[in-house]
């Protein structure tokens, strides 16, 4: 064997050993591909689970929804979800919201029926693949995803234990010309009542379960701060238990990387208090 051949053989061995090391040391995660006729294309979903995951043990479930123009990777780019899943013993699911779905069944786009997809396709796939404690299901999101998290929670309070929103667009009627929302909801001028039907702040009045707690936060320099403040005030006025957190911050990753830790702690505290 020549020296060059030995060199390449040794290099190959080192690379293979490094790959093996990574496969042992990295935290476990899955990538799921889910199809349905009523979504724009195949949904790619990242799932993070504890490093010591045991199939016989049931785990709390946390859905994390990304913002407008983002995708399923956005949350893991903001914070290390591998370590959170292991530390807090959560199954964390990050689906793709298809850039601009707003996580609703759009009255305008037949191939953007996200609420239906969420419960008819995504949830059953997660339940089939992982052992979920169905009494401890949580959801949160940022910006568009904050809207989506609260929307799905308020529409389906029996399914979720709690919900969160960071910098959420919790009143879409306040931004009728932004983020191409008319393509999803139709013209605000022509369909104001329809927009209210999909807006979180208007859904509060029909929310009956006052025993459930939610967490909402927003930076004081964020363009959506007034909307978040109004949402929190409405919650308090009708007796919904809300932790509303404010502080310096804009509508940006730097703020969300700090704010989301409060959501993890909030949800974990709900579980821990139940176990005492």
Image (cartoon, rainbow, N blue to C red):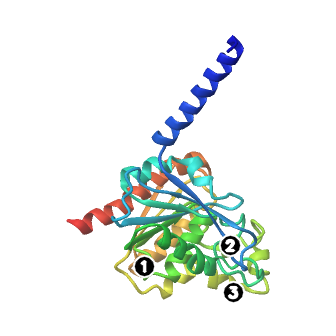
Q: Residue 248, percent across and down?
A: 52, 48
**SS label for mark 2:** loop
**SS label for mark 1:** helix
Say which quarter of the image contains residue 177: bottom right
Q: Residue 130, percent across and down?
A: 45, 66
Say which quarter of the image contains residue 197: bottom right
Q: Quadrant of the C terminus?
A: bottom left
Do labels 3 and 2 touch, CB within 8 Å? no
User: Where does label 3 land, which residue?
Assistant: 194
Mark 1–mark 3 Cα distance, whole angstroms, equals: 24 Å
User: Where does label 1 land, which residue?
Assistant: 237
Can see residue 251? no
For label 2, count other residues whose C-alpha is less than 10 Å away and answer few (under 14), some (14-19) or many (20+): some
User: Where does label 2 land, which residue?
Assistant: 35
Of residue 224 and residue 107, the one placed in the foreground of this image is 107
Mark 1–mark 2 Cα distance, whole angstroms, equals: 42 Å
| Of callouts 3 and 2, the N-terminal one | 2
Mark 3–mark 2 Cα distance, whole angstroms, equals: 28 Å
Q: Quadrant of the N terminus?
A: top right
**Total numbered badges shown on the rendered structure:** 3
């Amino acid at each position: 064997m020549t020296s060059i051949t030995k060199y390449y053989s040794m290099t190959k061995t080192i690379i293979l050993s490094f790959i093996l090391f990574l496969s042992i040391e990295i935290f476990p995660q899955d990538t799921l591909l889910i199809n349905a006729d009523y979504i724009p294309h195949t949904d790619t979903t990242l799932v993070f689970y504890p490093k010591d995951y045991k199939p016989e043990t049931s785990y709390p479930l946390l859905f994390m929804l990304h913002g407008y123009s983002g995708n399923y990777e956005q949350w893991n780019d903001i914070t290390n979800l591998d370590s959170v899943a292991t530390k807090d013993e959560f199954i964390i699911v990050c689906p793709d919201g298809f850039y601009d779905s707003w996580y609703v069944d759009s009255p305008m786009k037949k191939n953007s029926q996200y609420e239906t997809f969420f419960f008819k396709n995504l949830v059953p796939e997660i339940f089939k693949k992982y052992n979920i404690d169905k009494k401890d299901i949580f959801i949160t999101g940022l910006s568009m995803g904050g809207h989506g998290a609260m929307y799905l929670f308020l529409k389906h309070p029996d399914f979720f234990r709690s919900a969160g929103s960071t910098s959420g667009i919790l009143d879409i009627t306040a931004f009728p010309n932004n983020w191409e929302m008319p393509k999803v909801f139709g013209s605000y001028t022509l369909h104001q009542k329809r927009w209210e039907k999909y807006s979180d702040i208007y859904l509060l009045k029909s929310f009956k379960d006052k025993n459930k707690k939610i967490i909402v936060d927003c930076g004081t320099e964020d363009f959506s701060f007034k909307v978040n403040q109004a949402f929190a005030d409405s919650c308090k006025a009708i007796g919904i238990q809300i932790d509303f957190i404010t502080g310096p911050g804009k509508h940006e990753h730097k703020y969300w990387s700090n704010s989301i830790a409060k959501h993890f702690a909030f949800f974990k505290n709900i579980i821990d208090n139940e176990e005492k």
